[in-house]
Amino acid sequence: MEETHKHNNPLSFDDGIDLLELFHILLNGKWIIISVTAFASIIGVIYSLNLPNIYESRALLTPANSSGSISNALRGYSGITGIAGLSLPIDGDKNNSKKAIAKISSLSFFENEILPNIFIQDLLALKSWNPKTNSLIYDDSIFIKSSNTWIRDSSNAQKKIPTPQESFRAFKSHLSISEDNNTGFVTISIKHESPYIAKEWVELLVGEINSFYRQKDKIKSEKALSYLNQKIASTNLSEIKQSIADLLKQETQKLTLIEANEFYVFDYIDSPAVMEKKSQPNRARICILFFLMGGMLSVLILLIKHFFFKEKFA
C-alpha cells in the first residue's frame, strides 16, 4: 500500500527528483540566488547606463513619377517615328521609385553620392553626443578631432582611414528602408547617437536620390533633343518634319519639367525631424533581462552543485 501511494504521488518524478526536494534545495540556497541575481542585476544596470541613446529620424515619402505623362505622350508618336525610320530613345520608366529603393542601398550610390557629403568620423569614430552643447565626442583611440587624424589600429586587414566599403557596411547598420505594398509609400529612417545627424542624413538621402535620377533623365532628354534635331535637319518630307517637331515640343516640355522638379523621384508626406525622445536602448527591458538571467543562472548553479557533486562524492 505504501509503495502504491508513493508511486501515485504527483510531487514525484521518475528520476527520483520531487518538487519538495527541489523546494528545499532552493530554500537552502536562497542566499546564493539572491547574491547571483543581485549581481547580475547590478551588471545589467551598469551596462544599460553605459549604452548611448540612439535617436531615429524618419521620412515618409510618396513616389513622384514626374516624367510619366510626357513619356506616355511620346509613345503616341511611335508609329510615325517608325515610318520615318527613327529610333527615338523614349524614357518609358515608370518605376523609378522601386529602382531608387534598390539604388539607395547600393555601394555605388553611397560611395559617389553620400560619402562625399558626410564626415566618416561621425559614422565610425563617434563615442557620444552631448545634448546640452550639441557637440560630438569622438573615441580618441580611433580619431583625433584636433588634428583630424585617424589613429586606429590597422590590424585585421583594416586601414587607418576607413575604406568606402567599410564605411558602407557601417552606414547600412544605421539605415532602414521599407515600402508599403498597398499604398506605395516609402519610409526611410536613420538611427544615430545625434538626432541632428540622423535628420541630416535622411534629408541627404532623399535629396541625392532625387538629384541622381533627375540628372540621369536630363542627360537622356538632352540626347533625345539632339537626336531629333539631327533627324529634322536630314529629312525633306513635310509630314515627317511636322511629326518630329511635335516630338521636339514634347521632349522640350519634359526637359523643362525635369529641371524644375526638385522632388523628382520621391516627395515628402512627412519630413524628417530632430527627435527629442530616444528610440533605444530600452534600459528597463535590459535590466529585467539581466535579472531573469541571474535568477535562472543561480538556480542552475544550485542544481548542479546539489545533484552533480552529491553523486560524485557519494
Image (cartoon, grey):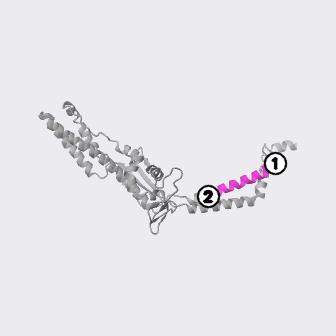
Q: Residue 288, labelled with which disc?
A: 2
Q: Is residue 78 above or below residue 262?
A: above
Magenta part of the chain: 291-314
Instruction: Name the quarter where the N terminus is drawn.
Output: top right
Query: What residue do we see at 42% from left, 47% from top?
Result: 107
Q: Is residue 304 above or below residue 86?
A: below
Residue 199 image point, x, y percent: 41, 58
Q: Is residue 222 above or below residue 78?
A: below
Q: Is residue 312 above or below residue 288?
A: above
**Element type where label 2 sits in the image:** helix
Residue 172 image point, x, y percent: 46, 50
Q: Nearer the viewer, mark 1 or mark 2?
A: 1
The CA distance from mark 1 to mark 2 is: 35 Å
Sequence-earlier tag: 1 or 2: 2
Q: Is residue 212 left or right of residue 227?
A: right
Query: What residue do we see at 80% from left, 45% from top?
Result: 16
**Residue type, label 2:** Ile
Mark 1 surroundings within 10 Å by alpha-carbon count, few (fewer than 14), some (14 through 19), many (20 or more): few
Q: Nearer the viewer, residue 229 or 48?
A: 229
Q: Which residue is mark 1?
A: 312
